[in-house]
Amino acid sequence: MAQKRIVALLFGGRSAEHEVSIISAGSIHKNLDKQKYAPSCIYINKRGFWRVVESPFLPQAELEKGPFLTFLPWGNRSSLSPIDADIYFPILHGPNGEDGTIQGLFEMADVPYVGATVLASAMGMDKAVAKSLFQEKGLPVVKHLVLTEFLWKEKSTEILDQIHRDFSFPFFVKPANMGSSVGITKVISGKQIQSAFQTAFQYDSKILLEQGIQGREIECSVLGNSNPEASLPGEIIPYRDFYDYKDKYIDGKTSFKIPVELPQDVTEKVQHLAIAAFRAIGCSGMARVDFFLEEETQKLFLNEINTIPGFTEISMYPKLWELSGLSYPLLLDKLIDLGFEQHKNKKREGAALKP
């Protein structure tokens, strides 16, 4: 029997999506083929310290029991055994996980890992940068405005005038570097603008204002490296005004249409644009791409790309691949193979530089 590959699942982390990450890691751990893989579970607490744990299913109090390991040279080192694995699977949603930081550590260590590279992760995480890249590639995005906290403090009156002139209600205010709908406000009147900005600035010093679209929320999963494929699309029907954090991971009252009822040409356009967005940021491994389908014009707008999408049992990324004929365990097989492939290609490309 072939030796099992050790897959290190990294979860938790320092972002506001810490709890979501633990739930996603539990789903991945559950669906990993234990005949092929031996999962090694690495919990990262909210201070950024690492600890090898038995599984993601431990109670929070058990996860927090030390000792923890720090990679900082000035931190307190422990006598823990070195962390070792054949491949590393980051399940760290949001900043300090999905933004290229953990990927940079993997690159420095020269180890295989699942998902997007440093640059693609960073660009995908920053919604303002991603939108600029999408526009440069001619991909359709909604009207938006990027603001920094400094600019808002210095020129709030002028900015409010610009918003009232260029945008109509409702519009959305969100942190530029955050996921899982954390820090997002749907603004339906002028009275909400300042509080919406205050909420978003709690999570990032750069925020995004986006024109609201009356229509349907469509999502599509992408899988691959140099030759990515797109799943069949699905539709989110929010229980509240929009698909917020509470409904994504706590209440679960939002409904999904899988498969979604779309004309064939619209389905194909969603898949085409999803792959185009994936390639625009140089992504690899996986991504979920989100769209709006405007009710009146039937025009598609690319909303954002998520390079480490949710992996809970109700998350769209694995559900869409299951709809497309790839079960959750086989999807994990493919992602792990793609991680090894990405590392092998990088090594081969760097071989010419060796003396």
Image: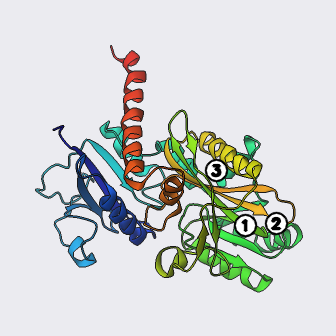
Give the quarter of the image for residue 235: bottom right
Question: Which is more N-terminal, label 3 or label 1?
Answer: 3
Question: Is 118 placed above or below 312 here?
Answer: above
> Label 1 to label 2, Cα distance in Å?
7 Å
Residue 216's disc is: 1
Q: Position of residue 286 (x, y in %)?
A: 49, 47
Asked if labels 2 and 3 touch by Cβ distance under 8 angstroms, the answer is no
At label 2, which amino acid type do we have? Glu
Q: Position of residue 211 (x, y in %)?
A: 78, 66
Q: Which residue is mark 3?
A: 130
Asked if labels 2 and 1 touch by Cβ distance under 8 angstroms, the answer is yes
Q: Which residue is mark 2?
A: 295
Asked whether 154 or 149 is in front, the reply is: 149
> Label 1 to label 3, Cα distance in Å?
22 Å
Q: Position of residue 78 (x, y in %)?
A: 14, 58
At label 1, which amino acid type do we have? Arg
Q: Nearer the viewer, mark 3 or mark 2?
A: 2
At label 3, which amino acid type do we have? Ala
Asked if labels 3 and 1 touch by Cβ distance under 8 angstroms, the answer is no
Provide the secondary structure element on which disc 3 rests. helix
Asked whether 94 or 58 is in front, the reply is: 58
